[in-house]
Image: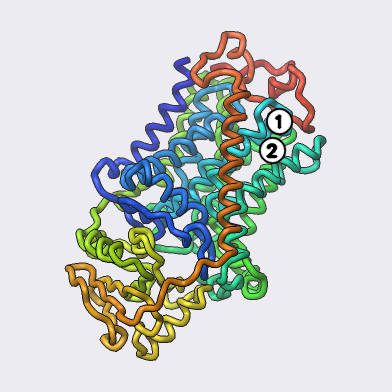
Amino acid sequence: MRARLVPHAAAALITAVVLAPLAAPGYVLRYDMVFVPRQPLRWEMVAPADALPRAVPLDALVSVANLAVPGWLLQRLALAGILYFAALGMARLVPTGRLLPRLVGAFAYAWTPYLAERLLLGQWGLLLAYAALPWLVAAARDVRAGRPGALARLVLAAAPAAVTPTGGLVALATVVVLLAATTGVARQALAAGAVAALCAPWVVAAVTGAAGGRSDPAGVDAFAARAENWSGAWGAVAGTGGIWNAQTVPGSRASPLVPLATLALLAVCAAGYPELRRRWPGGAGRLAVLAGGSLLLALAGTPPAAPGMRWLVANVAGAGLLRDGQKFLIPYALLVAVTLPVGAEVLARRLERRLDRLAGRVVLAAALLLPVAILPDLAFGAGGELRPVRYPADWTAVSARISAAPGEVLSLPFHGYQRYRWNRDQVVRDPAPRLLGVPVLMNDALQVGDVTVDGESPRAARVRAMLASGEPVARLGVRWVLVREEPGQRVPAAALAGLRPVYDGRYLALWENPAASGAPALHPRRWWAAGAHLLAALLVVVAGLAALCTRRAPWYRPHTRQSEEGYPWPSWPRSSSPPSSASHSGSSASTPPPAR
């Protein structure tokens, strides 16, 4: 019983160390991470009218959760859940009977440059897929083996990943690759179809929306993987880093020793891969295929593949999702985290045979600490970068006035991301669409250095053209114009011509348009997106009930002595037929169980 709780304790320790600053009150606001006290549910969160569904159904789920949980608590539960379940899922997935290698896997997966950089970019929705992937791989293994309740567990593991388009694609690719070319075709098709149904909300929203499906090819270079030290972009990606935004890279990544430490880590992984193939004869190769594919996507924006990616983005609808290829690196990070403890265990056994058990434990302890040594500044909120702040009272006042007379809002200055004094000068996405219970028209173009990557919304493009020509924005017909007062960000007086000021605070000013037109009619196609959301929700509910009905033992039940004498992980069968009792050992009958 005590040994089973150790991975939980390790996961809790990682979570507490990384998220320590969140013990203070307030909200952590960085780039895409925007939590608010109460996020109203709007049609734009279910089926965006003229924007791509990048946060569908994530935003709608947050709004529903906000009905029961305040925003400050919801943010902490989400971030803690990501770290905790990422560490715990990997500890359970590592194919070993020893406790210390399991902990090596937990640290190798929950303490990575990928997680740190995406966390600093505020992409917590993508990190839900990161945390879910070990559980999804385990469920896919059980589906291949025909174990009871495996399909239900697979659906539940894929559900957190499918709340964003990128996570949904990663989950679908994982299921297809791990279950392809096996017997029981109907069962494998059912599993892939279930994951595809979970992706239906954002797929249907994209098909029924008015946003252009093609994206600006300039984004390929802007979002390409970048160098973080002397090893270049390829070296950064090999260490699961290389994010396009230099402002979200921990300072330790610039150390000249990082590539050498990464090389040592990958050498241990290489030593563990042959052993992983022996323990998972039907799964290790498939995991390698997934990892290789994610590596190719991560490097697709760099030479020599960049021209092909630019053509794809400019000519194929939906290909803009591939511009930031580094975000697809999740399967590669998983393979690294699985092979590192196995490789460390192989090296430890050799030292144990030649020296003593203490030498082997030293190797395992070093492997456990290696990810932390490579990235020490993930601790304590990425070196203090993840510190909560409070929303100014201006937001409450403005929200109350708009709620009294609902209508569409234009948010100015027309920048989707901005630095705010009240947010410690950190860049964050405009909070207005989540704080205000009405449609908000904001800029979907993104400034990356000196490059402006155009968005897909035709209305946003019209606003940019009007502001550039000095036309008054009142002609748009919006009811309200919200002006965010920040140093160096001024709205031309000509743009506000014809508007009536109704609120002027320290950080926000609100103007009303007397000539506002009525609210746009609800497009009938939005009901298709609503139906897709209901389908996905129903699928999750049914899977949850099925998982409860087929659960064989509670998680807290201790192993018997007999179960502890062999490998406690299920083997990965070469086919989907139920494995024999011998195959559960994960090794040949002649191989003795490892010492604990």
Q: Give the color scheme: rainbow, by chain, secondary structure or one colour.
A: rainbow
| Mark 1, secondary structure of its residue | loop
CA distance for labels 1 and 2? 9 Å
Residue type at tag 2:
Ala
- Which residue is at 32% across, 45% downward? 70
Camera-nearest residue between 232 and 553:
553
* Above or below 562: residue 327: below
Taking the image as shown, residue 377 lies to the left or right of residue 285, namely left
Mark closer to the chain start, 1 or 2: 2
Q: Residue drawn 47% across and 46% down?
A: 112
Q: What is the number of callouts on the image?
A: 2
Q: Looking at the image, do the residues carrying marks 1 and 2 touch, with CB atoms under 8 Å apart?
A: yes
Q: Write down the residue under mark 1.
A: 572
Label 2: few (<14), some or many (≥20) within 10 Å? many
Residue 178 left/right relative to 457: right
Corner quadrant of residue 19: top left
What residue appears at the point 53 percent right and 53 percent down from the top-left corner?
164
Q: Position of residue 243 (x, y in %)?
A: 48, 59
Quadrant where the C terminus is found in the figure: top right
Is label 2 in a helix, a strand or a loop?
helix
**Amino acid carrying mark 1 in the image:** Trp
Q: Is residue 448 above or below residue 244?
A: below
Q: Position of residue 370 (x, y in %)?
A: 46, 39
At x 35% / y 65%, what residue is drawn? 430
Q: Position of residue 465 (x, y in %)?
A: 43, 85
